[in-house]
């Protein structure tokens, strides 16, 4: 499927069907529909009776196979969390989601086979930055000497984490950011409550998991940040821990709050929490910038461990104590 803001991108890319590359790399803001765009392209390339704009017909046998995730000429390469393993102290430790070399080897074998329908074969890699080093090097080799009639579609949320050599083997295709008006209209059409607030909190990205219970918890968390007190910080750390949330969730809330606080202090701008402009303005006048920068640095340091089974309560308490120092 295509979202309303992707029509211009589709018109642009459909004009390149006459000279297909060996690999495309789709980049753009998170939550803008890059994966859906790549899936739409993959289905169109495999369609038996494409439309005049090169879109898939949705009716042919190839399209039906694609819709059932059983097309013999299509493969998807995605990260897998294999579950938990026992750590040094006998406690479970969650493995990071990543694409491993074994999966890439299967793709290489697939690319060397003949096409089932005597046409194009498509491999979708998403998100490409989750390739571990061995997998990335294995994929690079097949991109350097691509088999005939095999097209690789790479989707990257953080293309800076990709090997430069992989990026150089792909035709890079940045997708347009949806306008605020178009994104807001789409959210309202989906029945999303507080669409304006939610769009701002997600940085203008209209595609996100909308969980009313989680939104209510975020409101409580942010309310505590707006009135920084020791008891409030400890209560929030305990509440988040009771909900069994990964550390990544409160890290995201706090990082965006700190961003707005720093942005107000330095440039008088807000991005994520415009509904709290009054509270943020008051806090910005009290904030000590060196401590604010230290707190932001502490949050950034923990971001790579957002899905680890660290003690969420202890980590969050430490961060919120750093936050209190900003106003001490």
Image (tube, grey):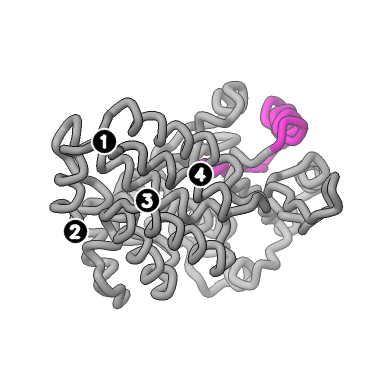
Dot 3 and dot 4 residues touching (CB under 8 Å): no
Question: Which residue is drawn at the image coordinates 44% and 62% (left, top)?
Answer: 235
Q: Position of residue 232 (x, y in %)?
A: 37, 59
- Residue under label 4: 318
Q: Spatial distance from mark 1 to mark 4, Cα to Cα?
A: 20 Å
Question: Which residue is drawn at the image coordinates 44% and 65% (left, top)?
Answer: 209
Q: In front of the other: label 1 or label 3? A: 1
Instruction: Tell whether position 125 is magenta.
Output: no
Q: Which residues are magenta?
A: 132-156
Query: Label for residue 275?
Result: 2
Mark positioned earlier in the residue sequence (2 or 3): 3
Instruction: Tell whether position 140 is magenta.
Output: yes
Dot 2 and dot 3 residues touching (CB under 8 Å): no
Up-down relation of residue 48 to residue 324 (above or below): below
Q: Spatial distance from mark 2 to mark 3, Cα to Cα?
A: 35 Å
Q: Spatial distance from mark 1 to mark 2, Cα to Cα?
A: 16 Å
- Work out whether residue 98 or residue 247 is closer to the camera in this orientation and state it: 247
């Amino acid at each position: 499927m295509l979202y309303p803001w992707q029509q211009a991108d589709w018109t642009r890319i459909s004009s390149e069907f006459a000279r297909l590359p060996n690999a495309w790399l789709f980049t753009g803001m998170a939550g803008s529909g890059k994966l859906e765009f790549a899936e739409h392209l993959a289905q169109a390339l495999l369609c038996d009776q494409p439309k005049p704009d090169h879109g898939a017909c949705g009716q042919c046998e190839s399209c039906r196979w694609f819709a059932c995730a059983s097309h013999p000429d299509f493969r998807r390469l995605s990260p897998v969390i294999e579950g938990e393993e026992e750590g040094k102290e006998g406690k479970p430790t969650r493995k990071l989601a990543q694409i491993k070399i074994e999966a890439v080897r299967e793709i290489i074998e697939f690319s060397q086979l003949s096409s089932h329908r005597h046409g194009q074969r498509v491999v979708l890699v998403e998100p490409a930055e989750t390739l571990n080093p061995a997998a990335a090097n294995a994929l690079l080799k097949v991109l350097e000497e691509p088999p005939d009639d095999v097209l690789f579609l790479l989707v990257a949320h953080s293309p800076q984490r990709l090997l430069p050599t992989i990026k150089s083997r792909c035709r890079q295709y940045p997708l347009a950011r949806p306008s605020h008006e178009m994104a807001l209209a789409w959210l309202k059409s989906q029945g999303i409550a507080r669409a304006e607030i939610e769009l701002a909190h997600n940085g203008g990205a209209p595609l996100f998991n909308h969980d009313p219970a989680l939104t209510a918890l975020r409101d409580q968390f942010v309310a505590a940040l707006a009135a920084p007190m020791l008891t409030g910080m400890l209560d929030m750390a305990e509440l988040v821990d009771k909900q069994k949330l990964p550390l990544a969730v409160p890290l995201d809330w706090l990082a965006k709050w700190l961003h707005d606080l720093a942005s107000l202090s330095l440039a008088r701008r807000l991005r994520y929490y415009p509904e709290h402009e009054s509270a943020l303005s008051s806090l910005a006048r009290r904030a000590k910038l060196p401590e604010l920068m230290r707190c932001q640095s502490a949050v950034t340091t923990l971001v790579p461990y957002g899905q680890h089974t660290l003690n969420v309560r202890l980590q969050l308490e430490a961060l919120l104590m750093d936050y209190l120092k900003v106003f001490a």
